[in-house]
Image: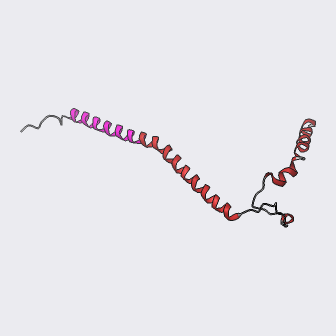
């Protein structure tokens, strides 16, 4: 129990100095705005939501194209195997049909 408490305490002490650095610029996003930072600071970087939407659309299109290419590449071996199976089944049916004709005597020419 002491080791558990000590390890939790150690993690807190390790992460505590990193929290302000992560809050300042580590994970800046356009989703939230700090009202205190909306001054006339020329160094403040504002989020361009319109450019972000365009970038999202472009990345979405690239992702869809990648998925379609993966889908075709994944289906190609399956389709080849399915076609080979269909050919094998047809050949097997023809072979069995010929064997059944020979056994039943249908290959013998009818006598007149």
Q: Would residue 111 be counted in the magenta stretch?
A: no
**Residue found 28% across the figure and 38% down from its top:** 94
**Residue found 65% across the figure and 62% down from its top:** 53
* Residue 4: x %, y % from top left: 89, 38
Q: What stretch is highlighted in magenta?
A: 81-104
Q: Which colour scheme is used?
A: secondary structure
Near-viewer residue (23 or 87): 23
Q: Magenta stretch: dominant SS?
A: helix
Near-viewer residue (1 or 105): 1
**In this rendering, would 1 be left or right of 101?**
right
Q: Would residue 84 be counted in the magenta stretch?
A: yes
Quadrant holding the N terminus? top right
**In this rendering, would 44 be left or right of 63?**
right
Near-viewer residue (20 or 87): 20
**Residue found 46% across the figure and 40% down from its top:** 77
Quadrant holding the C terminus? top left
* Residue 84: x %, y % from top left: 38, 38
**In this rendering, would 23 be left or right of 67?**
right
């Amino acid at each position: 129990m002491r080791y558990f408490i000590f390890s939790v305490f150690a993690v807190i002490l390790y992460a505590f100095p990193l929290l302000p650095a992560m809050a300042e610029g580590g994970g800046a996003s356009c989703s939230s705005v700090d009202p205190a930072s909306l001054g006339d600071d020329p160094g403040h970087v504002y989020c361009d939501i319109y450019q972000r939407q365009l970038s999202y659309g472009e990345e979405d299109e690239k992702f869809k194209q990648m998925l379609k290419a993966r889908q075709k590449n994944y289906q190609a071996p399956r389709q080849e195997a399915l076609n080979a199976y269909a050919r094998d089944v047809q050949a097997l049916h023809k072979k069995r049909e010929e064997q059944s004709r020979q056994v039943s005597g249908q290959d013998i020419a009818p006598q007149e």
